[in-house]
C-alpha cells in the first residue's frame, strides 16, 4: 500500500513537471504569435465600419480609376463627407453633402500647389469660390443663383 502511494505521488510529480515544461515551451510561441498578429497589416479593396444597428457609417474604398477615399455616412446611411483623391492627378479632395446628399462644399488642392474652397447652394449652383495659387495669390468670387458674379477680388 505504501508503494502504491509513493508510485502515485511520483507519477503526479512527473506529470506536473511535464505539464509545466510543456506550458513554458508553448508560452513563447503564443506570445510570438500575438506579437505577429499585432504587427500584421490588413489588405483589402474596401473596409466598412457599421454602427450597432448594422448600418454603414464609414467606408474606406479604392476603385478601378485610381480614386481612393473615405465615405462618412449619417445614421440614415447617406453620404455626408467624402475624403478622396482626384482621378486625374491624385490631388486630395474633401466633399461635404447636406442631408439630401446635395454637394454643398468642396475643399481641394491641386498638384501644382494651389488650393481652394467652393460653396454650392441647394440647387447645385456654385455660389462662392476662394482659391490660392502656388505663388501665394488669392482670389474670392461671390456668385448669385443665376451665375452672375456679385463680387470678385482681386
Image (cartoon, rainbow, N blue to C red):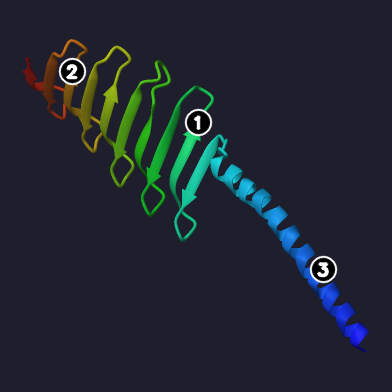
- Circles 3 and 1 in contact, beta carbons < 8 Å: no
Q: Which residue is mark 1?
A: 62
Name the image quarter holding the C terminus. top left
Q: CA distance from mark 2 to mark 3?
A: 79 Å
In the image, is 133 to the left or to the right of 42? left
Question: For the point 20% across and 14% down, which residue is it?
Answer: 133
Q: Which residue position is annotated with label 2?
A: 132
Question: Does dot 1 land on a helix, a strand or a loop?
Answer: strand
Circles 2 and 3 in contact, beta carbons < 8 Å:
no
Q: In the rendered structure, which disc, 2 or 3, sits on the residue that comes first in sequence?
A: 3
| Quarter of the image where the N terminus is located | bottom right
- Closer to the observer: label 3 or label 1? 3
Residue closest to the eye, 34 or 133: 34
Q: Tell me the mark number nearer the camera, choosing from 2 and 3.
A: 3
SS assignment at label 2? strand
Q: Position of residue 33 (x, y in %)?
A: 64, 47
- The structure residue drawn at horizontal position 91% and vertical position 84%, both measured from the top left corner, is 4
Crowdedness of circle 3 by 10 Å Cα count: few (<14), some, many (20+)?
A: few
Q: Which residue is mark 3?
A: 14
Cα–Cα span, label 2 and label 1? 29 Å
Label 1 neighbour load within 10 Å: few <14, some 14-19, many 20+? some
Image position of 115 with respect to 22: above or below: above
Per the model, the C-alpha gap separating discs 3 and 1 is 58 Å
Quadrant of res 9:
bottom right
> Which disc, if any, is residue 88?
none
- Classify 48 as above or below 124: below
Mark 2, Cα crowd under 10 Å, few <14 / some 14-19 / many 20+, is some
Amino acid at each position: 500500500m505504501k508503494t502504491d502511494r509513493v508510485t502515485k505521488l511520483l507519477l503526479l510529480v512527473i506529470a506536473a513537471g511535464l505539464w509545466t515544461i510543456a506550458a513554458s515551451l508553448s508560452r513563447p510561441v503564443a506570445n510570438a504569435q500575438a506579437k505577429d498578429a499585432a504587427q500584421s497589416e490588413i489588405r483589402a479593396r474596401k473596409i466598412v465600419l457599421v454602427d450597432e444597428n448594422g448600418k454603414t457609417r464609414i467606408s474606406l474604398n479604392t476603385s478601378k480609376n485610381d480614386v481612393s477615399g473615405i465615405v462618412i455616412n449619417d445614421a440614415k446611411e447617406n453620404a455626408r463627407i467624402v475624403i478622396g483623391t482626384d482621378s486625374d492627378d491624385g490631388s486630395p479632395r474633401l466633399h461635404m453633402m447636406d442631408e439630401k446628399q446635395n454637394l454643398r462644399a468642396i475643399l481641394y488642392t491641386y498638384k501644382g500647389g494651389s488650393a481652394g474652397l467652393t460653396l454650392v447652394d441647394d440647387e447645385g449652383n456654385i455660389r462662392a469660390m476662394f482659391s490660392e495659387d502656388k505663388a501665394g495669390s488669392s482670389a474670392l468670387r461671390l456668385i448669385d443663383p443665376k451665375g452672375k458674379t456679385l463680387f470678385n477680388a482681386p
